[in-house]
Each structure stands twice: as structure tokens, then as C-alpha cells.
């Protein structure tokens, strides 16, 4: 194997120097190999005078960042098979919950593959730990930060990468205590799709001229034709995507040239519906459709007889397939093999395929650009695909071994056409997203003691991408269009971002700010601000928590939770009002209903706001009698409300305890516990908390009078097994668990 043009040009800088780098090139041009070259450069420092690789595990650490869990897992697997197997490096994938980090595992890791959100949380938690507990020194051993898809900066999640990771590492690397550790000379390597302002990213990462490499479309292994088609928005995202089905046949006919086509759909169900729609519109047989000869027909019919999914059987017989995570593994493998060997000519799939199995096609179609998203740190809902996902999907177009060009068609709403044209043409300009969450990140740095005065705050501000972009585009950040000098610009930035937000944090009792003659202002954390940072609470939410009365009741706390900024993405849809009104009037479902303003003893007739919707859904989540046939989107929102709500109420409990508000503390603790266990404290189905007992089994136990934990604990294990129709030792295990929890034997 040989390096391609992109890799060859990058090699001397990536492998022969230690300078920071930013590489912008089209998807599919082999950029990730440059990350591996930088990793090899780091490892080459461990070759002794005899030419032997002499390495002490964990003494030099590299961190790989990618925007999605799928990319992180893919890279971790690949590097485990290469660096792990051949050089005995410890490759650690970090995509799970990091609240209880196993520091012994992390401290021996050589390469950590993770997302910005996970590393941001990790850097915050371990910076608070003492050195002898494995805290600061862990970060001190990071010598290389590899950033995949750095154009994530332009997404809502970009602030985490910018401030929660890179700027924080910059601040830590400059500490005197770190001067003898690898982080003091940390190297940054960032790769990106083609964007217009790569120079700004390079300035942010302190990249010298030789480290900035920008490549055009000519470096793509297969020429790519990209087309963006805009359509009128439907009443809902579901109806819009459904109407796009009518245009697919024409797009395939015009652009596929009889070669394999990949159609990306927003959901698993959508892949099946799209495949069956195309099948219904096509003419099967030798004179049209997607079967071109008898050999192909025979291959497809044989495969259809092997697969388990009935709908897939029908689709395969017409030369069409679908692929998603709910299919049996053997069915997915069959579909992948058929598509690779050109037996299936049209494959409908979800976006996850773009980040996993390598199934290139001549034509790639994005049927809609919105999907249901529940990324960590964001409210669930229908949102535009992030840029990385779009680029990964269109990167499947064009098969080097078969094609001289590929075609990618993006079907989207009319108003989104310019955005996708800019993305695909490389004319998109990255802007900092830190402006919307600046006070939260400033507070976090004060809590970590990275910022203690104005000078430290300015140093941190200068380490951000926001600072770079504010110089270039001040009006977008609320600044005067032209500053007369660098000194004038810095003064404006200090007042706009440092002084204003510090005073705001101090006004709410989150930090203490003291005017000092020598340093302008000193800053120190207060307990509420510390809780806000540790629990990742948005500033507006924290302010509302601080205003909760000491005697707050359970309904009051649910109302406060319903207004949390973390749920700002949840809206009240017209089609949901009837269901929500019905739930609010259902005594069995609503422990605490929303009352009429004029008649507090009666449920409100009409739900009119998103906050009221959330209030109802909290009750719906915790009831023993959930609504049947609840809208799918509301079920997804309930999951998110419960998850985020448990975190916010945990913060409530700690804050109210700090304020010595006994009643509010007790109610917050109870609400947090209810959300965590997903049931009210007076639930008749307490047995659902035990492993292996879900809704069906709990109903059987309740009918037998064993729904409460105390009743279940006293029951005969054989009776439990008989009622649940489970084998020994199911009953004994659950009884033993209850006895251990209660301290009995």
C-alpha cells in the first residue's frame, strides 16, 4: 500500500515534526491516516539507542476525539487491532457514563478514544481531584490531542469541544505544576471537511504555516457530483419525509445509471416504508425495475428464503433491501453481502451505516435532513443532521474500484438549501457556539480554580475559538464593528464577556467577585456555582432553583423542573394537545394535575404551553397506569425528561440542603428518587425496581398482593417463580437482594 496525495504531503509535518496541524480535505481522502502518523511520531520518542521500542504504559497519553459514539467505537476497534495488537498499547474506549470513572484503568491507558462531552466531563471531574488521587497528573500525561471532525465547532455541541476540552487543556498545560509533564508541550492535530476559514481554526490551535494543509475536491479518490433539492415543508417532519417518497423513483432513474443506490432515512421504520414504497412503484422482472437478469433474480430469491424478516423477504425479491439495527444480525449480514455484490440495487438504511460498515454506492440519497436526536446534553427532538453525519453519508457515493464519479443528492426543506450548498462546496464559515453558554463555562473555570482573577479570565478567553472569531466577525458576537487597536478590542472583550458575566454570576450568588486594585477583580467559587458546574446545569435553570422557597411542595418542584432551560427544545405540538388534555384529567395517571386558575381543585381543561406539557409528562412517566398508544415522539421526550430531570433534581436536593431548606430538600430528594426509579414513592408496582421484572411480571405480582417490596421480601421464592413463570433461582435471587438491602438475613 502507498500513501495518497493528501497523506504524502502531510507526512513530513505529521511524522518528522512536533508542530500542531489542521488538515482540511474532502471526505474519503484519507485524512485519518494523518492522525495515525502523529501517534506514531509520539511513540517514536520511546525508541532507545538500540532501536528498540521501550515504553512504560501510561507515561505518554494520546486522546482521540470524534463527534459520535459510532466513530469512536470504530476507531477504538481499528487501533486495538493495530497499535494494541502489535505494540501492546492500551486502547480505551470511553463512551459510557463517566460519573464513576475507574481511574486505575484510565491511568494505564495509552490512547483514549472518546467524545468531546465525555472528555469535558472527565476533565472537570479529575481536575477537582488531588494529584495523589490520580487527578491532575492524569491530564498532565496527555501529550497528543487528535480531533476528528473539528467542524463540530459549528454545531450546538461545539462549545463543549471549544471550552470544555481544548481551552481547558490549554489552561491546564500552562500551569506551573505541569511544566515538567508532557501536557506542557501538548500537540494538537485537527482534521476537518473543507471549510472557508481553516485559518481561524489554525490560529486557535496555534498552528504554524507549515502545519495548515488545505486540499480541494481534486484529492477525492472518486469525483463527486453533489445536488441539493429543496421541497416545501409539510405540516410535520413525518409527513414531509413521507412526501419525499414520491420523488425517489425519478432521482434513482436520473442519477443511478443502473448502479447501486444507497438511500439514507431518518428512522428504522422509515427504511422499511421507503423500501416498500419504491418496490410498489417499480416494475419487477426483466423489463424494468431493479432486477436485470435471471441470475440476479435467482440469487435474490434464494436470499429471501434465508432471511427471517417477512417484509425484507418481500423487498429482496424485488431487488431492494433495507438495513437497520432492529434486523437480526444474520439478516443484516445477508443484505450487506448482496449489496456489495450488486445483487441489491437499492438499499434503504439509517445514518448509522455511514459510520460503520463500508458499503459504497454510485448514488447516495439523503431522504430528508432531519432525524430524531437525543444526543447527550441536548433535549430530544427532530433536528437537522450534524455536519459530520451528512459528510459521512455523502462520502459513501462513488466506489473507487468501479466508478470514475459518484453522485450525492440531498433532499431537504427549501429554506435549508443554501446551508447544505455551502457545506458541500466548502464555503461554510465556522463560528463559535460558546457565546450562548459562556457564563456556564466561565463559572466552571472559576470552580476549577483555572480562573481566579481578571488576568486569568482574559487568558482563558484568549484560548477560545470565540476570541478568534470575534476579531474577524465582531457584529455576530455583539461587539462594535471596528476596534481602533488590539488594546481597544481586548478592552471591549473584557467588558462584554468577563466583567458582565462575572457580575451576573456574582449577582445570583454563584461566585464571589471582589474588586482589587492590582488585579481588577478576584473571583472565587461559591457552593451554588460549584453545584451548577458539577451537575452541568444551565444558568437560567440554576437561577430558578435559587428562587425556590424553602417550603416548596412536590408540585412546585415539578413546575420548576418543567420550566428548566434544558428542556427549551421541547415544544407543544398541535396534534398532542388532545392526548395531554386527556391525561391531565385522568386521576389514575396524574398524581399532581395542572389546575384551572379559577378552580384550583379541578384539572385544567386545555394544556397551552410546553412547560405544562412537561409537567403532564413527568406524571405520565411515573404513573402505574401509563397511557396506551401514546405518540412516539412524546415517549421519546419522556425518556429525556426523566434522564435530565433526575440530574436537575439531584442538584435541587444538594442546593436546598446547602440552604438548610428542610421541606424543599426532602421533596427534591424524593422527586429525584422517583425519576431515577421511574415510579412514584407510593407505587403499587415497587417490584419493577428489581432486575428481570418489567410491566407484565409486575402486574402479575401486584394481582397476587406482592407488588410492594416488603411483601415480596416476605414471600416464598417458589411462589414468586410460579407467578412470574421464571425458573429457579429467580425468586431466591430477588429475595436475597431485598434482604441484603434491608440488612436482614
Image: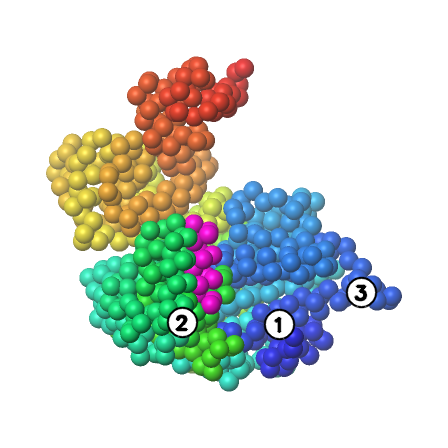
Residue beneath label 2, please? 260
Q: Is residue 516 left or right of residue 557?
A: right
- Quadrant into which the C terminus falls: top right
Image location (x, y in percent) of residue 106? 64, 49
Q: Which mark is residue 305?
A: none
Q: Secondary structure at mark 3?
A: loop
- Quadrant into which the N terminus falls: bottom right
- Location of residue 721 with respect to 470 vertically, above or below: above
**Tag in front: 2 or 3:** 2
- Location of residue 482 with respect to 275 vertically, above or below: below
Span shown in magenta? 328-341
Image location (x, y in percent) of residue 7? 62, 77
Q: Please rate how many residues cluster around mark 1, counting C-alpha atoms within 10 Å: few if below 14, some from 14 to 19, many from 20.
A: many
Residue beneath label 3, please? 47
Separation of residues labelled 1 and 3 (CA atoms): 20 Å
Q: Is residue 720 left or right of residue 279?
A: right
Residue 185 in which image quadrant:
bottom right
Residue 84 in which image quadrant:
bottom right
**Tag in front: 2 or 1:** 2
Separation of residues labelled 2 and 3 (CA atoms): 48 Å
Image location (x, y in percent) of residue 393? 43, 68
Residue 15 in view in this figure: yes
Residue beneath label 1, please? 34
- Location of residue 720 with respect to 204 vertically, above or below: above
Image location (x, y in percent) of residue 702? 32, 22
Amino acid at each position: 500500500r502507498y500513501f495518497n496525495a493528501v497523506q504524502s504531503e502531510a507526512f513530513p509535518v505529521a511524522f518528522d515534526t512536533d508542530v500542531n496541524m489542521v488538515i482540511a480535505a474532502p471526505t474519503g481522502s484519507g485524512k485519518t491516516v494523518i492522525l495515525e502518523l502523529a501517534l506514531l511520531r509520539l511513540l517514536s520518542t520511546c525508541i532507545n539507542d538500540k532501536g528498540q521500542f521501550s515504553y512504560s504504559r501510561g507515561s505518554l497519553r494520546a486522546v482521540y476525539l470524534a463527534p459520535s459514539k459510532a466513530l469512536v467505537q470504530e476507531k477504538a476497534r481499528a487501533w486495538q487491532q493495530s497499535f494494541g495488537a502489535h505494540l501492546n498499547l492500551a486502547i480505551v474506549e470511553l463512551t459510557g457514563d463517566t460519573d464513576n470513572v475507574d481511574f486505575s484503568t484510565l491511568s494505564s491507558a495509552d490512547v483514549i478514544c472518546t467524545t468531546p462531552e465525555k472528555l469535558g466531563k472527565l476533565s472537570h471531574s479529575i481536575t477537582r481531584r488531588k494529584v495523589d488521587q490520580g487527578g491532575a497528573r492524569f491530564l498532565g500525561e496527555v501529550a497528543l490531542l487528535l480531533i476528528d471532525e473539528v467542524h463540530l465547532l459549528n454545531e450546538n455541541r461545539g462549545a463543549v469541544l471549544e471550552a470544555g476540552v481544548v481551552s481547558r487543556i490549554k489552561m491546564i498545560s500552562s500551569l506551573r505544576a505541569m511544566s515538567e509533564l508532557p501536557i506542557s508541550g501538548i500537540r494538537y492535530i485537527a482534521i476537518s471537511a473543507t471549510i472557508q476559514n481553516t485559518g481561524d481554526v489554525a490560529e486557535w490551535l496555534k498552528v504554524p504555516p507549515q502545519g495548515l494543509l488545505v486540499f480541494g475536491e481534486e484529492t477525492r479518490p472518486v469525483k463527486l457530483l453533489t445536488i441539493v433539492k429543496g421541497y416545501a415543508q409539510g405540516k410535520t417532519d413525518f409527513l414531509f419525509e413521507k412526501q419525499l417518497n414520491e420523488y425517489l423513483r425519478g432521482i434513482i432513474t436520473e442519477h443511478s445509471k443502473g448502479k447501486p443506490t444507497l438511500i439514507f432515512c431518518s428512522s428504522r421504520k422509515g427504511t422499511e416504508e421507503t423500501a416498500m414504497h419504491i418496490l410498489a412503484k417499480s416494475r419487477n422482472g426483466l423489463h424494468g425495475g431493479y432486477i436485470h437478469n435471471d441470475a440476479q433474480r435467482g440469487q435474490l430469491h434464494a436470499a429471501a428464503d434465508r432471511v427471517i424478516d417477512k417484509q425484507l423477504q418481500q423487498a429482496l425479491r424485488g431487488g431492494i433491501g433495507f438495513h437497520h439495527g432492529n434486523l437480526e444480525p444474520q439478516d443484516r449480514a445477508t443484505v450487506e453481502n448482496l449489496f456489495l455484490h450488486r445483487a441489491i440495487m437499492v438499499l434503504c438504511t439509517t445514518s448509522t451505516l455511514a459510520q460503520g460498515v463500508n458499503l459504497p454506492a454510485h448514488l447516495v440519497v439523503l431522504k430528508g435532513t432531519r432525524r430524531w436526536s437525543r444526543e447527550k446534553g441536548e433535549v430530544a427532538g427532530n433536528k437537522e443532521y450534524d455536519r459530520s453525519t451528512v459528510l459521512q453519508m455523502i462520502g459513501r457515493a462513488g466506489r473507487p474500484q468501479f466508478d470514475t464519479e459518484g453522485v450525492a443528492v440531498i433532499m431537504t426543506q427549501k429554506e435549508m438549501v443554501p446551508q447544505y450548498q455551502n457545506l458541500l462546496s466548502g464555503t461554510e464559515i465556522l463560528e463559535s457556539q460558546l457565546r450562548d453558554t459562556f457564563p456556564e463555562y466561565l463559572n466552571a473555570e472559576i470552580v476549577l480554580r483555572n480562573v481566579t482573577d481578571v488576568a486569568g479570565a482574559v487568558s482563558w478567553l484568549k484560548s477560545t475559538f470565540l476570541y478568534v472569531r470575534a476579531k474577524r466577525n465582531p457584529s455576530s458576537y455583539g461587539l462594535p464593528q471596528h476596534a481602533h487597536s488590539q488594546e481597544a478590542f481586548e478592552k471591549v472583550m473584557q467588558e462584554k464577556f468577563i466583567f458582565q458575566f462575572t457580575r451576573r454570576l456574582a449577582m445570583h450568588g454563584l461566585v464571589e467577585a471582589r474588586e482589587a486594585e492590582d488585579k481588577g477583580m478576584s473571583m472565587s467559587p461559591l457552593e451554588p456555582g460549584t453545584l451548577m458546574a458539577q451537575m452541568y446545569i444551565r444558568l437560567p435553570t440554576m437561577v430558578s432553583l435559587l428562587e425556590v422557597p424553602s417550603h416548596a411542595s412536590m408540585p412546585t418542584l415539578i413546575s420548576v423542573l418543567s420550566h428548566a432551560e434544558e428542556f427549551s427544545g421541547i415544544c407543544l405540538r398541535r396534534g398532542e394537545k388532545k392526548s395531554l388534555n386527556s391525561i391531565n384529567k385522568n386521576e389514575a395517571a396524574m398524581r399532581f394535575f395542572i389546575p384551572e386558575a379559577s378552580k384550583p381543585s379541578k384539572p385544567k381543561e386545555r394544556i397551552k404551553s410546553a412547560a405544562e406539557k412537561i409537567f403532564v409528562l413527568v406524571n405520565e412517566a411515573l404513573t402505574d397506569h401509563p397511557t396506551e398508544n401514546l405518540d412516539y415522539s412524546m415517549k421519546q421526550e419522556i425518556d429525556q425528561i426523566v434522564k435530565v430531570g433526575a440530574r436537575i433534581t439531584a442538584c435541587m436536593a444538594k442546593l436546598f440542603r446547602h440552604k438548610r431548606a428542610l421541606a424543599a430538600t426532602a421533596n427534591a430528594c424524593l422527586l429525584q428518587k422517583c425519576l431515577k426509579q421511574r415510579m412514584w414513592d407510593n407505587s403499587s408496582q415497587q417490584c419493577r425496581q428489581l432486575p428481570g421484572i418489567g410491566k407484565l411480571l409486575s402486574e402479575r405480582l401486584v394481582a397476587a398482593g406482592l407488588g410492594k417490596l416488603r411483601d415480596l421480601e416476605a414471600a416464598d421464592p417458589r411462589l414468586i417463580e410460579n407467578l412470574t413463570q421464571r425458573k429457579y433461582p429467580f425468586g431466591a435471587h430477588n429475595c436475597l437482594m431485598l434482604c441484603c438491602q434491608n440488612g436482614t438475613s
